[in-house]
């Protein structure tokens, strides 16, 4: 089959690789009908995430048709239409029983490695670092789904792929980011980053009843899309984020802050961003946590910082004393996708939201490598790329 | 589609030009004799030092400005000044060195112009299409709270002790 494979920093190729096979009775094989490039794929593309190996198949936003199931998968059959969540989970361990699927204790097949690095393992993820299992991803013609009896979202026929695909990651990720804020009707929610996850966080905060949603970015088309979703926007390349947030909240700061940027913050005109760039260049720091610092500074005391943005390793000059004294609550983590998807699928079917709004580019798998660059560089108005194998 | 003013590539290039400006400026201020020797501009050390100050100021501007576009155009202006100076050198006794420096500066000027153009705003027509992409069936104001039937799980709620008093009462 054809698949997009990682061959090093900024080197993704469309290769021919062996078809996946059932390896365990709980596996299923999916014929992929649509998949997408995610912002967190760019951390792999740019070489910021350790633990990638030459030839790894990329992709963790996937949907398709069940082709084959293992002997222990009794709730799926050939021909079923499924969206595959990016977090692989067993459904039986202590964490899964609590709904904490992204920290499933059993699905990471490199558990011992993750235990050493993270202290305790997290769930296996598709198309990601070997720290999270190194499972082949879904930017391919076929995908093997481990623990397939749990790791799937069954979706109805008759609804376009484009409307359902993002149940795999970015819609529940934006939703969880807003849910983590426990939004009250008087809350102002400030969201850094208007990429795909940011767009869904904006709409989730609105649907959950935030009084005011403020979106921060510098890319004009992303800001325009954020405004379409009901956000007041701040272009950080033109105005001071701190001053504007204080203006918009009568000097009190937003109660809830969401970081949809993560480790590759592209701040300009700030001393700390130049400091991060310099330290990263000499390998003394892995992440650029400008957004975290800014959120800690502007958030109203006793507020909540919700962090769906991906961080990879070591962060420097994070003003934790400020956060401690302000009594901030931090909520973060990979998304417990299936905890939210039944509800979100219902909301899609009810017509509360059509997630396809975020798609700007649809191409074949062979054009995927070029689209990584287009997406990374935000060229051609690119916000979300869907691939059709 | 549109050319985006905020494109990462253009902004990264602007930042790179900022660092380049500072490095060149420091060299021109600290070692003007070496620079004049390399460019065939003997006797113009004071002028080169003043150009160095200009480069440093431009570099700092590029790295600290919220919008680097005017500073990139400032670099283009500086390039014109440099080219004029080097052209005078080409007419002098060390025309070969000045000629090479002239061609190198011409290349850098082309890069500066390309960066300034890449930082331009997107076309209004393309922006309009993004303003229509709400994903919502009604205007956002009408959709506010449409999912308020959602019950936040207990483990995702703000700790009771941190809730404002008016919410606790509610």
Image (cartoon, rainbow, N blue to C red):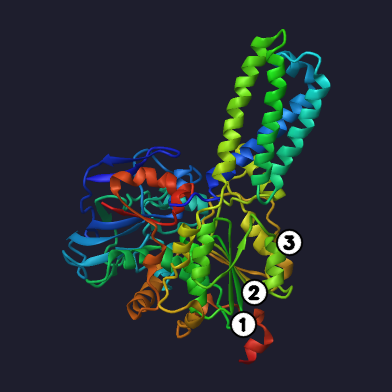
Residue B132 makes an appearance in the image: yes
Q: Residues within 10 Å of mark 1 (few under 14, many from 20)?
A: few
**Residue A344 horizontal/vertical position (percent):** 38, 75
Identified at 48% across, 42% down, the residue is: A47
Residue A276 makes an appearance in the image: no
Q: CA distance from mark 2 to mark 3?
A: 19 Å
Viewer-nearest residue: A270 or A59: A270
Identified at 61% across, 92% down, the residue is: B170
**Residue B53 horizontal/vertical position (percent):** 79, 32
Question: Which of marks 2 and 1 precedes in the sequence?
Answer: 1
Identified at 57% across, 46% down, the residue is: B119
Viewer-nearest residue: A237 or A262: A237
Q: CA distance from mark 1 to mark 3?
A: 27 Å
Q: Are marks 1 and 2 in contact (CB under 8 Å)?
A: yes
Q: Quadrant of the N terminus of chain A?
A: top left
Position of A166 relative to A186 (above/below): above
Determine which residue is flagged by label 2: A255
Q: Residues within 10 Å of mark 2 (few under 14, many from 20)?
A: many
Q: Which mark is residue A186?
A: 1
Q: Is residue A124 left or right of residue B44?
A: left
Question: What kind of element bears circle 2?
Answer: loop
> Based on the displayed image, in which of its 4 quarters is residue B95 positioned?
top right
Identified at 37% across, 64% down, the residue is: A166
Determine which residue is flagged by label 3: A321
Which chain is indicated by disc 2?
A: A
Which chain is indicated by disc 1?
A: A
């Amino acid at each position: 089959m054809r698949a997009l494979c990682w061959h090093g920093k900024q080197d993704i190729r469309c290769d021919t690789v062996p078809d996946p096979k059932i390896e365990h009775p709980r596996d299923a094989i999916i014929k992929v009908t649509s998949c997408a490039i995610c912002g967190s794929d760019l951390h792999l593309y740019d070489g910021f995430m350790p633990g990638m190996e030459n030839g790894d198949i990329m992709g963790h936003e996937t949907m398709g048709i069940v082709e084959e199931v293992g002997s222990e998968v009794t709730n799926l059959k050939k021909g079923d239409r499924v969206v595959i969540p990016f977090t692989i989970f067993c459904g039986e361990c202590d964490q899964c029983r609590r709904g904490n699927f992204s920290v499933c204790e059993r699905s990471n097949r490199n558990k011992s490695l993750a235990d050493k690095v993270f202290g305790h393992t997290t769930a296996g993820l598709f198309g990601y670092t070997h720290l999270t299992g190194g499972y082949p991803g879904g930017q391919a013609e076929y995908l093997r789904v481990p623990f397939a009896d749990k790791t799937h979202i069954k979706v109805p026929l008759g609804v376009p792929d484009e409307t359902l695909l993002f149940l795999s990651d970015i819609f529940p990720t934006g939703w969880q980011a807003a849910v983590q804020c426990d939004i009250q009707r008087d809350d102002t929610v400030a969201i850094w980053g208007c990429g795909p996850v940011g767009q869904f966080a904006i709409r989730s905060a609105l649907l959950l009843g935030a009084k005011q949603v403020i979106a921060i970015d510098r890319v004009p088309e992303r800001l325009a899309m954020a405004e379409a979703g009901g956000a007041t926007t701040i272009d950080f390349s033109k105005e001071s984020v701190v001053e504007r947030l204080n203006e918009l909240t009568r000097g009190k700061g937003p109660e809830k802050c969401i970081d949809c940027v993560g480790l590759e913050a592209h701040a300009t005109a700030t001393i700390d961003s130049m400091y991060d760039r310099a330290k990263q260049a000499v390998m003394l720091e892995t992440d650029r946590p400008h957004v975290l610092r800014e959120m800690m500074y502007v958030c109203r005391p006793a507020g909540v910082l919700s962090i769906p943005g991906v961080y990879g390793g070591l962060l420097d000059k994070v003003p934790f004393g400020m956060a401690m004294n302000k009594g901030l609550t931090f909520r973060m983590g990979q998304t417990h996708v299936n905890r939210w998807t039944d509800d979100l699928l219902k909301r899609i079917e009810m017509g509360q939201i059509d997630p396809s709004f975020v798609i700007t580019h649809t191409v074949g798998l062979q054009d995927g490598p070029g689209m990584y660059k287009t997406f990374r560089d935000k060229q051609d108005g690119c916000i979300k790329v869907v691939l059709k194998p | 589609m549109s050319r985006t003013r905020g494109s990462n590539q253009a902004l990264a290039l602007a930042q790179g030009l900022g660092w380049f400006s500072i490095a060149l400026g420091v060299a021109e201020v600290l070692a003007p004799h070496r620079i004049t020797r390399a460019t065939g501009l003997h006797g113009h050390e004071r002028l080169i030092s003043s150009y160095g100050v200009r480069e440093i100021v431009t570099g700092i501007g590029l790295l600290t400005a919220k919008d680097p576009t005017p500073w990139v155009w400032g670099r283009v202006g500086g390039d014109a000044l440099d080219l004029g100076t080097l052209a005078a050198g080409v007419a002098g006794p060390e025309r070969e060195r000045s000629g090479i420096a002239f061609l190198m500066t011409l290349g850098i000027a082309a890069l500066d112009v390309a960066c300034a153009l890449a930082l331009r705003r997107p076309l209004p027509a393309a922006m309009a299409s993004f303003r229509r992409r709400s994903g919502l069936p009604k205007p956002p104001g009408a959709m506010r709270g449409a999912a308020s039937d959602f019950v936040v799980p207990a483990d995702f709620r703000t700790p009771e002790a941190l809730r404002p008093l008016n919410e606790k009462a509610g």
